[in-house]
Image (spheres, helix red, strand yellow):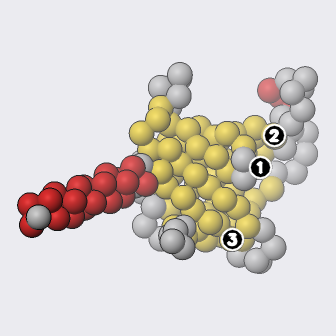
Amino acid sequence: MKKLLAIIVLSLLLINSVSAKDDSKNINLTCIGNDKSTTQTVIIFRDKPSKLNKKIGFVNGNIVTVDETAANYILKHEIGPEESTKEEKIQVTHVINRTTGVKSESWIVPNGKNVFFSGKCQLVKPKF
């Protein structure tokens, strides 16, 4: 009976440690603008390179490419209608400091004024 109980306890411990390792693969962040007017959800998939051999992620549901340096995460994507050319789309770049969580976001608008935002990101910790 003691051996059976020991096996059950060990298997539960192993299952919990495996699920904890799986959760650590993704980086889930919530980013709030300095003026508190915007909130963004950022997910970075650490172990899933895309077909182009780049890491990918999401910013508010938009697919982004992710470059990871020692100091920053650099996330890039485009905004615009599907039928528009690359020159007509808005180029969006998010740079998140990996130590402080400070985020800067730049929008390069074709034939217009470029826009810059800043804010702070925090890791999302599961509630249960």
At label 2, counting other C-alpha atoms closer than 10 Å, the crowd grade (few under 14, some 14-19, many 20 or more) is some
Secondary structure state at the residue bearing disc 1: strand
Query: Which residue matches tag 2?
Result: 79
- The residue depicted at 53 percent of the width and 22 percent of the height is 51
Q: Say which of marks 3 and 1 sits in front.
A: 3
Q: Identify the image quadrant of residue 8.
A: bottom left
Check contact, mark 2 vs mark 1: CB within 8 A.
Answer: yes
Amino acid type for the residue under numbered disc 1: Trp
Picture coordinates of residue 14, whole percent (x, y): 24, 55
Which residue type does callout 2 highlight?
A: Ile
Location of residue 94 with respect to 78 vertically, above or below: below
Relative to 68, 30 lies left or right: right
In this orientation, which residue lies closer to the viewer: 49 or 117?
Answer: 49
In this view, the residue in front, 95 or 7, is 7
The amino acid sitting under disc 3 is Ile
Which of 54/105 is in front?
Answer: 54
Which quadrant does the N terminus fall into?
A: bottom left
